Image (cartoon, rainbow, N blue to C red):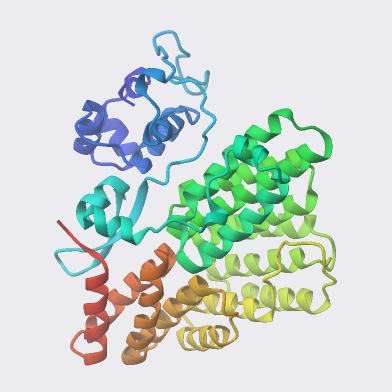
Amino acid sequence: MRAWRTHRGLSLGKLSGTILFNASYMARVERGGQAASADLVRAYDDALGASGSLVRLHTSILEGVSLEALPKGDVANRGPHVAKASVALAGESEIQAPSEEGMSVPVRSDDGRIIFVSLSRRALIGALGAGAAIAATPNLSAAAAPAPRADLVASGADPIELLQATRRVLIDNDNLFGPHRVIPTVQQQIAAIKELRVDRRGTDRRQLLQLQTQYSELCGWLYQDLGDFRAAQHWMREALEASHMAGDDELTTYILARRSQLAGDMNDPIEAVDVAEAAEDRAVPRSRLAAVAATYGAHGHALRNDPLSAQRAYEHALELHAIMDPDPSSPWGVWLDAAYIDVQRAHSLAALGDHRAAAEGFRNAISRLPAGYHRDRGVYLGREAVSLARAGEAERAAVVGLQALSIAKETGSDRISRELAQLDGILDQWRTVPGVSDFRDALTDAVLRQA
């Protein structure tokens, strides 16, 4: 990291101002006095034009690769500037994932607020105690165990069918237990797929590329749920590239729609609207994917504070849903129904400031949610609680917030935690109300303290 910075001619202070990390922390990392977080490594990589080499090197080290075995590089003879050359201090690694080592953790600060800090898994274990941290992250079921290429081939079963089945298990685990426990296995499956592609041709290779797209999209979704939007964007780009290589137009359309959803979570309304429109233009007329894209684009209009356009867009999405003639063999967007569109509309009403209507929308959606959508139920409960609090219904908000908190503790979902942190701040004005104080005490017990 230091070699890259000095090669670019940047002081610690200059780079600190660019990537918004503390210069003292950066200095300790460069001296080897403190472990680098995944967020810091990615920030260095992006700002210094390292083309992913720092991220891949960091990932390799975290996974236990011997330092002596890592490829050596010399910056002295590399290109003079990011715009003119791609510098690679370390050789390319097969593992291209941003590490899951950095975790966004809610913390009760000294002044009473809930804030989010980035901790390495190592630091988190130090804070909780190794026993508690291990107990908090049990292994996935045997069906979702890592599957390197050799194991897939040696099993005698069709590797592609095994990878497809494993993905379904991983999705179920995510819905029940949250992304922290699923991400490492997803990334191992991606590595196995890339190995399998080496000696496959024709239909098998195309199917592997489709699987790589699906796993990369899943990884993007998991990081999105964790609130690590930079990593989510990385994996969505990986998914889009793989979908083009697979030549699967429907899959490419789905990835574009998902990118619109990610842009909405990142409060980027222009991106959300533009990408949604691109996805709808690509979608087969009267298809489910056209309705999915229209739904996400509608929220982009709400983020632009354009209620009329948002209302028209949701009406358009519902019309598409009513007349759609979905391909029964298509797996994309099968969760889309009128209730899903309604809950997205409730999310948009909250963004537009109509909190009572938003709370009612979330309540109706929760009542129609399938039993398996455990984590999503927590997200909607959290959003309902925030809407109730903003509408002045503090006690009802606290009751619903406690329900969401229970699911947040089970799943580790950053989306739920951030809704609860927002709720905590709103309810501060009613902190002496018994139900509110119960919620805030429970939230304090559930998060780390500033220390």
In this rendered view, identify the residue nearer to me: 192 or 440.
Answer: 192
- Give the left or right position of residue 304, taking residue 155 as reference: left
The answer to which image quadrant residue 111 occupies is: bottom left
Q: Number of labelled discs?
A: 0
| Residue at (48% x, 57% y) in the render | 140
- Tell me: residue 339, above or below residue 14: below
Residue furthest to the top in view is 77
Q: Position of residue 148 (x, y in %)?
A: 57, 38
- Tell me: residue 152, above or below residue 219: above
Q: Position of residue 44 (x, y in %)?
A: 38, 33
Q: Quadrant of the C terminus?
A: bottom left
In this rendered view, identify the residue nearer to me: 145 or 404.
Answer: 145
Q: Position of residue 364 (x, y in %)?
A: 56, 88
| Residue at (66% x, 44% y) in the render | 212
- Give the left or right position of residue 169, taking residue 18 as reference: right
Answer whether residue 243 is visible to the viewer in this image: no
Q: Quadrant of the N terminus?
A: top left
Q: Position of residue 378 (x, y in %)?
A: 45, 75
| Residue at (52% x, 18% y) in the render | 85
Answer whether residue 264 is visible to the viewer in this image: yes
- Give the left or right position of residue 316, taking residue 237 as reference: right
